[in-house]
Image (cartoon, helix red, strand yellow):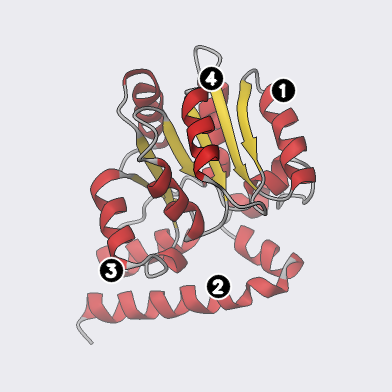
Amino acid sequence: MATPSEIRACIHERIDAGPFLPVVTVNLTMLHAHPPLLRNWLIAHSLMTPDGISMAIMSGLRYRSWIRRYPGIDMVRDVLNSATREYRVALVGAKLSVLTKTVDWVVDQGHTVVFAKDGYSPFLDTDYHQLQATNPDLILVALGCPVQEAWIHQASAYLSRGVAIGVGGAFDVWSGAITRAPKWVRVVGCEWLYRLIRQPRRVGRLLRAIGHMVIYRDRSTGS
């Protein structure tokens, strides 16, 4: 499993040299969320990184090894902060008020936003052509799983270069719409619990993750 520094190096390299690279930040609830054709395309073309604590637990249960997770929200911040030049950034997703403040956040990191489209308006063919014309280095897609991965797949027909990353609800944090869990909570791997308390509607995702853990544990033990 690649380290965070290796992941960042890969992203910077593909931004500079191409070709187009999708990045999927994986947790267990995503494993069966994508239709087979999309899942196969992602496996063949994307860089997959471990996002949630569920992936570390699954690895421990099935492979007896603990992988280091790298949440997408941290990865994108680190990529922007470690860039050696100003990146051209495209933003897709969230409601307009959140998107506007996320634009400000990206600019504060020292980069330029060349395209921004909220997640509540239909994305038309003309929008894809406009995105293509801006020639973005980094495309951040906050549409939630599996919609954001399906969008990246569609956008790949228009983009020959750049890196697209599905970031889920990261725009809400970067815009200040919601507060992220304290650092100590994130370090011990309990950010999911903090988010569940603040957003009880996420309980369905938690139950699916637990179900996937049981499945992988049983497969690893042969029961």
Q: CA distance from mark 4 to mark 1?
A: 12 Å
Q: CA distance from mark 3 to mark 4?
A: 39 Å
Q: Residue at x 28, y 82 (%)?
A: 218
Residue 142 rendering spot, x and y as whole percentages: 59, 48
Image vertical order of residue 4 relative to residue 208, above or below:
above
Secondary structure of residue under mark 4: loop
Identify the residue at the far bottom of this view.
223
Judge by depth and name the residue closer to the eye, 121 or 212. Answer: 121
Q: Nearer the viewer, mark 4 or mark 1?
A: 4
Q: Residue at x 61, y 63 (%)?
A: 192
Judge by depth and name the residue closer to the eye, 113 or 125. Answer: 125
Disc with the residue nearer the chain's start (4 vs 1): 4
The residue singled out by tag 3 in the image is 62
Is the C-beta separation of discs 1 and 3 under 8 Å? no
* For residue 13, side relative to residue 185 (left or right): left
Secondary structure of residue under mark 2: helix
Q: Nearer the viewer, mark 2 or mark 3?
A: 2
Q: Amino acid at mark 2?
A: Arg
Identify the residue at the far left of this view.
222
Secondary structure of residue under mark 3: helix
Q: For label 2, count other residues whose C-alpha is less than 10 Å away and answer few (under 14), some (14-19) or many (20+).
A: some
Image vertical order of residue 140 relative to residue 10, above or below:
below
Disc with the residue nearer the chain's start (1 vs 3): 3
